[in-house]
Image (cartoon, rainbow, N blue to C red):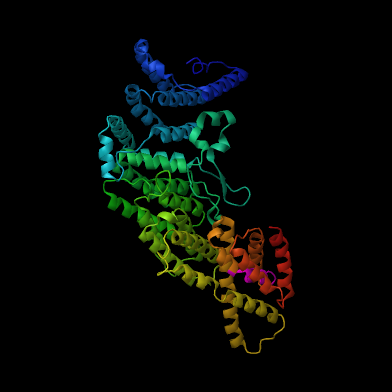
Amino acid sequence: MGILGSSHHESIKCQKAITELFVKYNIRFSGISRSFFKNSQSLADRPGFLGLFSQINALGFETNSLHWRYNLMANRVLLLLILASRSEPDIYSQILAETAGHFLRNLKSQLPHSRMLAISALNTLLEGSPHKASVEDSQQSLDHPEECNILSTGTLLNDIIQEEGFMNDTLNSLSHVHIISDSDGSSKASYGASSFQSGSDKAITYFYFDFSASWPCTPSWISLVGGGTFYSSFAKIFKRLIQQCGMPVMSSLQTALEEFLSSKERSRQCVAAEAMAGMLHSDVSGDLESGSDWLMLQLQKVVLAPSVESVPEWASCIRYAVTGKERSGTRAPVLRQKVLDCLCTAVPQSVATSVLAKRYSFLSVALIEISPHKMSPAEEQYHVTILNELLDNMSHSSAQVREAIGVAMCVACSNVRLAGARSPGVLTEQTGNEYWYKRLTDGATELSVSIQNNSQSKQLELASDSSTANGLDNKEEADAKRMETIFHFMIASLKSGRSSVLLDVIIALFYPVLSLQETSNKDLSLLAKSAFELLKWRTLPRPFLETAIMAILSSVNDPNWRTRSALLSYLRTFTYR
């Protein structure tokens, strides 16, 4: 209270010292001793503790005349005190609902720092158990007396959420945290708080879980959907609010999101993606069917929307929505199957190629989050359907789509391989481990020889019959595009580390990588060089080592000197490794 009552000092030096003292106090605060609550002599102090709590709570409101930093410090102490009293259920239950409601209101605070602290606080305080989809789990939790505070907290939070315009104002305030920077010409973005918070402010607003990577659980390596401003801590708030308060929150969000989903502002699209992610991952009970139908309709609109600026955020939304539950991430969310159904639905032929590339990117991030070792029969069938579609479209006319297909094939094929390793023969009848392998590798060597020959002959021949030449050109073009997709597949496999289960495929494509580094098709050659650089540093365990040596020996007497030169370059690294 001494620190919080020091706002009257006018000296800047003095205020800086007070802030530094508070930050140090904040770091050193280890909670209230349990013996304080257990000691019978301190029973008389309990009203004093609750009184202190109410006093600090009053300082945390923006309506008082305190300087904003003192307002922020009061809110931080409030959070420290409630966490310190968790070991004493009687006190904790008295202050939980009021404190959670206080921080919920702060989500639409005019002060950006207060919004950031409110996000940390709500992610810490909200437990979200009563309204999950499992009826048995809910019944078990109701048998425990501590569930009463969660239900009373839910009631109070619901009252706040039902206030007119509350959800719309909250979404609007949170969208202001997403600061999109276009200074370097690309759509890079920084965490909103970083751009307006000093070091001491961050020490007050950040909390312990802000420094731990709880999501995503799997590596992020797909460049097509990188560089977004999706904050999983925001998505978690919406998820927890729905789980704690039930369908009223879902209804309020649906109403408020109508405007944000149709907005062309990227910051509003960002917060819409976070809210949708929380809704999709919440596993709420109640009128699940109508709620999920609305969600799937909105998701379909996002997939078909011509705008591509917010693709990274929506890709993160889908990834969050299908992420497995529990610590191991193996239990599928309730709506995962519906999300995959939506993404597997073919888009109309008339859509722009950017929309098709976006859909394949969404499929990639969704498949990444599926655990191959725990794949359900339905998820196996999704892989079969997706792989067939990808293999049929390898010669697509758009370079962007071909890259997206290559990445999606890498994820799908490696998942199939890993699932097959768990239970051999599961997918063999439908895709077969061999089916997609043959479609990828069969004829690849002959195709590369043909592309190489065509590249050389183009410089010499003069077309005499234009119709025949056009027919040949179309075939050559399709062959080159197919090979580009194969290279994208290789690059994605080697970059992501998934090549460890695809080494036989990689080695089977060894000759095309060597032979196509110098052709008249510059795009194809650039991809071949990229694949070559990654392939050089991939170590090959046995029995793949022997297969690789056979592939090397078969290329030693190749008639094209460029192929032999590339082989010598590869051999230096290969022999060393």
Q: Is residue 359 above or below residue 148?
A: below
Q: Position of residue 402 (x, y in %)?
A: 54, 66
Question: Front-most of 101 and 552?
Answer: 552
In the image shown, does 489 or 466 lie closer to the viewer? 489
Q: Is residue 344 left or right of residue 185?
A: left
Residue at horizontal 61%, vertical 85%?
469
Image location (x, y in percent) of residue 202 = 55, 31
- Magenta span has 514? yes
Q: Nearer the viewer, residue 180 or 427?
A: 427
Q: Which residues are magenta?
A: 508-519
Left or right of 163, for residue 466: right
Is 31 in the magenta? no
Res. 342 image quadrant: bottom left
Quarter-of-image position of residue 559: bottom right
**Residue appearing at x 48%, y 24% in the figure:** 71
In the image, taking residue 218 as reference, residue 468 lies left or right, namely: right
Q: Residue furthest bottom?
A: 464
Q: How many marks?
A: 0
**116 above or below 50?**
below
Say if residue 297 shows up in the picture. Answer: no
Do we see residue 422 in this rendering?
yes
Closer to us: 573 or 107 = 573
> Relative to 418, is 175 above or below?
above
Location of residue 456 (image quadrant): bottom right
**Residue 218, placed above or below residue 398:** above
Q: Quadrant of the C terminus?
A: bottom right
Q: Position of residue 184 (x, y in %)?
A: 63, 49
Q: Position of residue 185 (x, y in %)?
A: 62, 52
Q: Residue at x 44, y 41 (%)?
A: 234
